[in-house]
Structure formats: C-alpha cells, structure tokens
C-alpha cells in the first residue's frame, strides 16, 4: 500500500480555515463526501466516534484520523493543511495543522487499514517532509511530496 494509492489530488486542501478540531473534521468529511460519493454527516459521525475513543493526533503538528465507512470500495485518503494549528489533544500536546485522514471500506480487513495508517505515520514522522508540506503552495506539490519515499525526499532537499 503506497500513499499514492490512497490520495487523489482532488482530496487535498490547503489554507483550510478551522477554529477547532471539530471544524477541521467537518471540513475533512465534506471533502471525503464530495470526492468519494459519501454522506458528509455519516463521515463526520464516523470520524467523531473514532476521536472519542482516543485522539488521532500523533505529534509534531500531525493528525491521522481514520474511519470505516459504508459505500467505499477501497482505501481512500484526504489531506488537509490548516492555515492555523488547532488543539487536537495530540500525544505531545501540540496543536495540529497537517491532517491526513484515511477511510476504509466497512468490510476491509484490519490489516489493510493498519498498513495504510502505518505508511502515513512513517512518512509524516520525517521532519523534512513536514516542513516541506507546510511550505508548498499547491495540491500538486503536496501530492508529489506525499507519494515519494520520505528518505529520498529528505536526500533531495539536502542536495
């Protein structure tokens, strides 16, 4: 499972204004609904239910919310960069401005879902990638950064 398999350019939003975690999740739900033919309310409900079980704020300004949804035939992703970081109850207590949401079909195996989460978490663990994601100005640039190997990306930015 590669990030490029999850993320379409149309499911990337930059300069998103959200005043809190709930609003950020609502924006993600709207993007998912529009791009994947889902109901925004159902998406938001699934994301909110998952957040109530424990925050998906993984640290360093990053969150990886996820949910299983009826109506999907494969794993899908949404990437949002907020214009201002919001409180997300992250593990390091830092506010979040980079959010990569993963949506799995209701009947997908847990292994498939976990592999996708692990892939996204590993990529966003790289400080150089996070810095680049915060600096670029287009969805195409975000997509290009996320689909490349983070180790290769850090080498090319150092050159």
Image: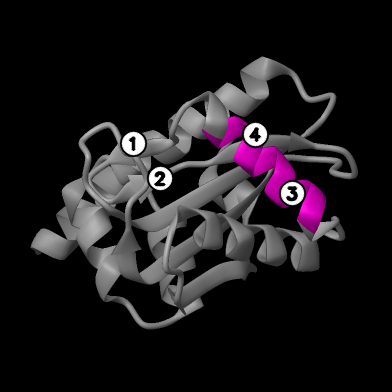
Which of label 4 and label 2 is nearer to you?
4
Q: Residue at x 34, y 36 (%)?
A: 58
The answer to which of 90 and 19 lies nearer the viewer is 19
SS at badge 4: helix
The residue tagged 1 is 58
* Res. 43 mark: 3
SS at badge 3: helix
Magenta-colored stretch includes residue 74: no
The answer to which of 74 and 91 lies nearer the viewer is 91
Q: Residue furthest left?
A: 158
The answer to which of 9 and 16 lies nearer the viewer is 16
Does the rendering let one see residue 95?
Answer: yes
- In the image, is residue 66 above or below residue 10? above
x then y, percent, for residue 39 = 85, 56
151 sits to left or right of 27: left
The residue tagged 4 is 49
* Res. 127 mark: none
Q: CA distance from mark 4 to mark 1?
A: 17 Å
Q: CA distance from mark 2 to mark 1?
A: 5 Å
* CB atoms of marks 3 and 4 within 8 Å: no
For disc 1, the neighbor class at 10 Å (few under 14, some 14 to 19, many from 20) is many
* Res. 63 mark: 2
């Amino acid at each position: 499972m590669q990030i490029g398999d999850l993320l379409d350019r149309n499911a990337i939003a930059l300069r998103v204004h959200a005043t809190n975690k709930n609003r950020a999740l609502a924006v993600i739900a709207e993007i998912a609904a529009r791009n994947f033919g889902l109901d925004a309310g159902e998406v938001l409900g699934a994301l909110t239910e998952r957040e109530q079980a424990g925050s998906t704020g993984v640290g360093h300004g990053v969150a990886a919310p996820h949910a299983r949804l009826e109506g999907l035939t494969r794993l899908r992703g949404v990437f949002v960069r907020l214009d201002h970081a919001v409180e997300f109850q992250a593990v390091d207590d830092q506010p979040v401005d980079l959010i990569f949401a993963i949506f799995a079909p209701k009947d997908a195996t847990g292994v498939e879902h976990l592999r996708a989460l692990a892939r996204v978490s590993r990529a966003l663990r790289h400080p150089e990638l996070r810095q680049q994601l915060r600096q670029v100005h287009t969805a195409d640039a975000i997509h290009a950064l996320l689909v490349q190997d983070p180790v290769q990306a850090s080498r090319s930015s150092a050159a």
